Amino acid sequence: MAEIEWNQVREFTLGVVARPATRKRNRIEWGPKAIRVPQGSKDDRVFTPCAYVASGGRLTLDPEEMQVLCSVAEVAENSFEVRDGQAVLIGTITRVPSGRPMLRPTWRMDQPGHPEIVGRTEWLSGSPKELAAKAAGRLFTGVLDAITSAGDEGGDQPTKDRVLEWRAGDEVVMLSESTKSVTLKADWLDRRLPFAYTLIAEG
């Protein structure tokens, strides 16, 4: 498969699966933990690494951990800075507690020179008209589970992964399903911020 340029990524996952089991391949092939981009057909799927998870909250372009792509550091409670290999600030990521025991947190992503990005459960994201349309197609029990389950991203109980819709104003910038599937919509979004988000969310 072709080598992946990190700044061209449109979809990725964080994990150690290099080749998943398929109808044509009955075993999983493993690799180092990395930001991985799905390539190939469904039966020949490959997850190609574009950045490797290294020590000290870093992502590197090589498994030897010599070429630093970015690093993540918690600078205050629930607030993280993302910096490049020269320690220049790329942006910040903040986990925002709901303040209510039954509601999950939201996330905020700040990239200098661009509008603030807010990530929240997709069923709670959008204009009133969009919310009404989403609610009309969703059973109440499903909505309740999506809103109140407290498993991933800071909760204590296991639950199915929720989909976050990340918006800058009315623009959908990114969609994320835990750390296993992230889809990037905006060309202007620095890919290192969503990469870093998956490290934070998994941690």
Image: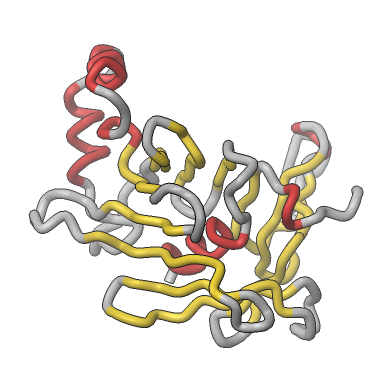
Closer to us: 99 or 172: 172
Q: Position of residue 97 (x, y in %)?
A: 20, 60
Place of residue 146 in the rendered image (x, y in percent of width and height, measured from the top left): 26, 38
Tell me which residue sits at (70%, 56%) in the image. 36
Colour theme: secondary structure
Q: Position of residue 107 (x, y in %)?
A: 33, 55
Q: Quadrant of the C terminus?
A: bottom left
Instruction: Residue at 41%, 73% (x, y): give it.
Output: 80
Q: Is residue 92 shown above or below 127?
A: below
Give the total number of marks visible in the rendering.
0
Residue 48 seen:
yes
Residue at (76% x, 60% y) in the render: 49
In the displayed orientation, state which residue is furthest to the right: 2
Out of 120 and 31, give the one closest to the viewer.
120
Question: Is 57 on the left or on the right of 163, as rendered?
Answer: right
Question: In the displayed image of the protein, which residue is found farthest to the front?
Answer: 113
| Percent x, y of residue 5 | 81, 55
Q: Is residue 134 above or below residue 86?
A: above
**Residue nearer the viewer, 92 or 36:** 92
Q: Residue at x 44, y 51 (%)?
A: 178
Q: Is residue 20 visible?
A: no
